[in-house]
């Protein structure tokens, strides 16, 4: 089952989308918003599944699904917590600024609490007031959970996964060093995140969703040129069950919590940072990694951060090259 | 106008409470939840004000208000961002662990993104799985905002304040050093926060609310003994307008955002950390400050962090010693 929210109001209008993303059926007669569905999932999920089946069979009225009309599936959420499960990414970004990777990073997940009150839709512009802030994309996998009790273990946590999707977790790289130096984590350096047009139930992903990981390449383009196609199932040090359990160690997580994987990143064949796609590698899911590799190879970064007018595309394909979650496609624009 | 949410469902049931906190009237015929009221404040606030006036006049059916039946006014919220506006507190806590206070802390607000999906009601127990985590109270003032556009200045930000209340921003002190050392800020070290029984509109606070600060002593008791009565209007380096504008620098804030002051803390008459109430001072709004002062005076902390069975009370009084926001009263309990 694939779910999306058409733009409208603060929480959008819940729709069920066909597996090929061509059609949708209104879900409002069942439940008006995705948050409301997640709040009472056991009640609503079977009804939404029936609607999804009818939609696939073409046995109910349906409308054309246009991704540009979609808001984030949860236009606002009660929690957005983003891990850094691809420790390779963390190691690379730290290497560029000469910071060590503590040994504990390989056993204790990094996670930050993100803002969740104002997400961007998949085709919304990235509002950037100042190019000097160093705007970067970060392509990631996310899951949406049901209620998770404080102290839940990895298996229970994994069982609470309701939906899976993609995000562009925009970062303002040049604001990060000063902000992290203050010791309280990210705030201004993490503006609004963007989510894929649809979120998908685990069963609809078949064998791609296993062991708490999503085993597919995450495709990233910048201004129409290939940037990354790292496999989200590879080099993920902490699976989603472990990330969720980490988040729930000292408090309950409530339905609709979004947990992120962190920037997807694969090592190179030699265990190093990996090569660009143009050199036969799988490339990168953010510009910070590109710049790090450039710094390692030539002493300084060459690729600039995002500028007004740049366009980012992020998606994941099935075997027939059809987007599974739809496509995030955003142009960077002046704010306001 | 004073608003509260009776327990019930994920978002509670909105009620209007009389200014003496003795009575309430159901607001559900106007709008069912506080979040929904904040989502369309210009429409609902006048209707709720009329209800409040009728309640004060005794001209409508009313029920006895029992604070134990209240959830947090927003049982869950889309954003909870907590500043550290009383830099005196930051300086003290850092002094205890031998860390410097950078000069920038006096001009650039500290703020962390908190979890907002599962708040505690004012009489709910603090669920503490492990006393070794070093559970501390932190008594603070909070404001709830309407929509705030990215890049808003301090005055516009201050104009977006809809409601004012109190919080107990529970911290797990012994988890903080390792978590902050990882660089991503607080996560496990900040379990669910608790809020006062009622939130109050700025106009109902009269002259106590001015210059973006709440000018009243914040009273804290531990196990029935006075702990603190620091004035929230004194030594607040950053007013709420400045804190909100800080939060909105790179992104919009959506209606229902809760912004915290950080632990209220007053300097002593000599500019130092201030004395306990038993020695004629205004005391402290958290145990970390008590322990810091003990460390400065005697080389080591004496007061333990909270243990199962300990009870914390936090409130603020009017001239006639009546609680303005009701009373947070929580006992620390085993989790689960």
Image (cartoon, coloured by chain):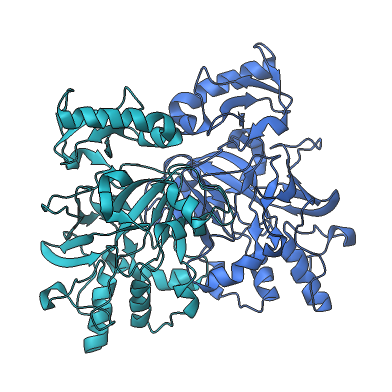
Chain colours: A cyan, B blue
The N terminus of chain B: image quadrant: top right
Percent x, y of residue A148: 51, 47
Please provide percent x and percent y for residue A269. Answer: 23, 80
Residue under the image location 27 percent in, 72 percent down: A266
**For residue B100, which quarter of the picture?**
bottom right
Residue sitting farthest toward the front? A207
Residue at 60% x, 25% y is B15
Does A323 appear above or below A236?
Answer: above
The answer to whether A280 appears left or right of B232 in the picture is left
B5 or B174, nearer to the observer: B174
Closest to the observer, B280 or A202: A202
Query: Is any atom of residue A328 visible in this view?
Result: yes
Tell me what residue is drawn at x 59 percent, y 37 percent.
Answer: B202
Q: Is residue A141 left or right of residue B135?
A: left
Q: Name the quadrant containing residue B230.
A: bottom right
* Left or right relative to B213: residue B289: right
Where residue A125 sits in the image (x, y, percent)? 23, 51
B210 w.r.t. B88: above or below: above
User: How many marks on residues?
Assistant: 0
- Using the rendered image of the protein, determine whether residue B272 is visible from the camera's viewpoint: no
* Residue A283 in picture, x, y percent from top left: 20, 71
């Amino acid at each position: 089952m694939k779910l999306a929210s058409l733009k409208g109001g603060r929480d959008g209008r819940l729709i069920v989308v066909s597996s090929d993303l061509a059609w949708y059926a209104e879900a409002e007669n069942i439940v008006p918003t995705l948050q409301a569905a997640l709040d009472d999932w056991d009640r609503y999920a079977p009804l939404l599944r029936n609607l999804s089946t009818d939609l696939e069979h073409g046995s109910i009225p349906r409308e054309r699904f246009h991704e540009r009309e979609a808001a984030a599936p949860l236009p606002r959420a009660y929690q957005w917590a983003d891990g850094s499960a691809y420790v390779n990414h963390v190691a690379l970004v730290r290497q560029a600024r000469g910071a060590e990777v503590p040994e504990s990073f390989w056993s204790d997940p990094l996670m930050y609490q993100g803002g969740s009150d104002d997400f961007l839709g998949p085709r919304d512009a990235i509002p950037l007031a100042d190019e000097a802030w160093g705007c970067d994309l970060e392509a990631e996998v996310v899951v949406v959970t049901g209620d998770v009790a404080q102290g839940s273990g990895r298996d229970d946590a994994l069982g609470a996964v309701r939906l899976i999707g993609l995000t562009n977790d925009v970062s303002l790289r040049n604001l990060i060093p000063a902000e992290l130096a203050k010791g309280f984590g990210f705030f201004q350096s993490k503006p609004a995140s963007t989510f894929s047009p649809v979120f998908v139930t685990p069963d609809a992903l078949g064998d791609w969703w296993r062991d708490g990981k999503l085993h597919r390449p995450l495709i990233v383009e910048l201004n129409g040129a290939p940037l990354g196609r790292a496999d989200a199932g590879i080099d993920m040090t902490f699976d989603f069950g472990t990330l969720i359990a980490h988040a729930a160690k000292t408090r309950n997580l409530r339905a609709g919590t979004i947990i992120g994987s962190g920037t997807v990143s694969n090592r190179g064949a030699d265990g190093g940072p990996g090569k660009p796609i143009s050199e036969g590698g799988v490339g990168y899911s953010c510009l910070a990694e590109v710049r790090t590799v450039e710094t390692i190879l030539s002493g300084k970064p060459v690729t600039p951060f995002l500028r007004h007018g740049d366009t980012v595309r992020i998606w994941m394909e099935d075997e027939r090259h059809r987007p599974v979650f739809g496509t995030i496609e955003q142009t960077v624009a002046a704010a306001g």
